[in-house]
């Protein structure tokens, strides 16, 4: 699994996220959703869906017309690897800047803040034996 995750590009990650949120979904649905966020040709979306299928990240839903895609791997299994890749590659291995960003972000909902507080509380506890 590590190899496909290591080679995921920005558009592939975006498409994978959209499939997680809308699966099963057609190429047309994904193309429309991608174009709401960025200017990408429909052919690029189709090619990216095919690449994700070859990498084992997406699968076609059998006996569906139009063809629909679903994610092979669960989001909760993939996101930690992507976040770790970001921390290692962009932040030099230190999650400190990410934590500082989150602490100062005005985009956080009350739910997000409570989740972060629960994580901080958990981190602050001594390890259980």
Image (cartoon, rainbow, N blue to C red):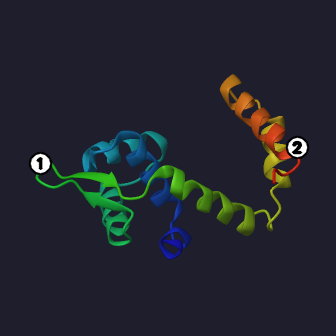
**Left or right, 113 with reference to 43:** right
**Left or right, 78 with reference to 105:** left
Residue sitting at x 37%, y 63%? 48
- Choose mark 2 or mark 1, whichever is in front: 2
**Local secondary structure at mark 1:** loop
* Residue 70 pos. (x, y %): 31, 52
Quarter of the image where the C terminus is located: bottom right
Residue sitting at x 21%, y 53%? 61
* Residue 51 pos. (x, y %): 36, 69
The single residue placed furthest to the front in the displayed view is 129
**Local secondary structure at mark 2:** helix
* Residue 34 seen anywhere in this rendered image of the structure: no
Residue sitting at x 79%, y 62%? 91
* 55 over 76 or under it: above or below: below
Q: Which residue is mark 2?
A: 124
Mark 2 Cα-neighbour bin, 10 Å: few <14, some 14–19, many ≥20 = few
Q: CA distance from mark 2 to mark 1?
A: 52 Å
* Residue 82 seen anywhere in this rendered image of the structure: yes
**Left or right, 1 with reference to 54:** right
118 or 100: nearer the viewer: 118
Q: Which residue is mark 1?
A: 65
N-term-proximal mark, 2 vs 1: 1
- On residue 52, the disc is none
């Amino acid at each position: 699994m590590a190899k496909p995750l290591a080679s995921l590009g920005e558009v592939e990650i975006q498409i994978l996220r959209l499939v997680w949120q809308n699966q099963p979904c057609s190429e047309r649905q994904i193309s429309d959703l991608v174009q709401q966020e960025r200017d990408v040709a429909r052919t690029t979306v189709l090619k990216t869906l095919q690449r994700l299928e070859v990498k084992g990240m997406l699968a076609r839903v059998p006996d569906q017309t139009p063809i629909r895609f679903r994610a092979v791997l669960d989001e909760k299994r993939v996101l930690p690897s992507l976040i770790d890749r970001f921390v290692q590659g962009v932040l030099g291995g230190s999650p400190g800047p990410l934590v500082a960003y989150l602490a100062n972000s005005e985009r956080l909902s009350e739910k997000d803040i409570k989740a972060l507080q629960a994580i901080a509380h958990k981190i602050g506890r001594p390890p259980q034996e």
